[in-house]
Image (cartoon, rainbow, N blue to C red):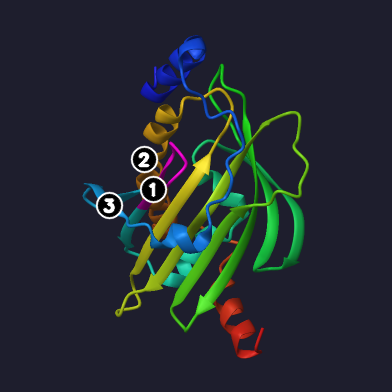
Amino acid sequence: MNLIRKFMIIATMTSTVCAFANEKIEPPAMESYNKLPWKFYESHPKVKIYTKEVPGSDLIAFKGEMTMKAPLHRILAVMKSPEIRYKWVDRYSGTTLVAKTSSTDFIEQTVIDMPWPISDRDFVNRTQTKLIGKNLVLIQINSDLDVAEDPEFVRGYTWNSSFSLRAAENNQETHVSVEIFADPMGLLPKSLINLIQKRWPKNTLEAIETVALSKEELSGASALSDLRKNANKGH
């Protein structure tokens, strides 16, 4: 049995003695959050992991950094192709578009399939994509609080999370950084949430690179060129 699944089952069975993340977290002020330092946590062959303690929360923010062996346009194409999202989003079950201002600013409900006996989660996030200069793409992800909760799921929350994609000088590699500060809510001890989420940056980044290096055709193949066209139009 998967180690994390064992922890989840134990956590559920011992719920009366654990401290739970059962109240909606409030988004930390962006300015103060950004001033908090990242601390090196651990290094893997491809990925470096950092942590950040957030005042007023027992949850820890995590960051992963990796240089991927694929060009910027291919990495962004992976992230902008919903048909293959299940290949790099852990326990991905599906996504529903809630609202769309533009191709670079939209709100989605994403469902995460949790192992029994944990209830499935949904996250309703606003995703905004920006091109900075010619070779840096910033994807910002934050919960949208105006969307009513779906009774079928436990609503999770995401704050101050992002992907930063920067083309390397050789234009054949991409420096990718991901930051996440999230709470899946429900009857899960915060210590367990931190244990699970510390693996998330590594697993996510390596999965994105794997898909990018494949020869699979992607619906988001024009994502970078579209961003550049819009920037040239002054959008």
Asked if labels 1 and 3 touch by Cβ distance under 8 angstroms, the answer is no
Q: Which residue is mark 3?
A: 39
Of residues 196 and 230, which is closer to you in this image?
196
Characterize the local packing of mark 1: few (<14), some (14-19) or many (20 or more) Cα atoms within 10 angstroms. many
State the CA–CA distance, disc 2 to disc 3: 13 Å
Asked if labels 2 and 1 touch by Cβ distance under 8 angstroms, the answer is yes
x, y (%) of residue 184? 55, 35
Q: Which residue is painted at 56% across and 73% down in the image? A: 130
Is 147 contained in the magenta span?
A: no
Please tell me whether mark 3 sits on a helix, a strand or a loop: strand
x, y (%) of residue 8? 46, 20
Of the image marks 1 and 2, the number of the one nearer the N terminus:
1
| Disc number for residue 198 | 2
x, y (%) of residue 83? 61, 51
Is 56 contained in the magenta span?
A: yes
In the image: residue 98, left or right of residue 163: right
Q: Which residue is mark 1?
A: 62
x, y (%) of residue 100? 75, 62
Q: Which residue is painted at 39% across and 22% down in the image? A: 2
Callout 3, which amino acid? Answer: Lys
Of the image marks 2 and 3, the number of the one nearer the N terminus:
3
Magenta part of the chain: 53-63
Callout 2, which amino acid? Answer: Lys
Of residues 20 and 228, which is closer to you in this image?
20
Of the image marks 3 and 1, the number of the one nearer the N terminus:
3
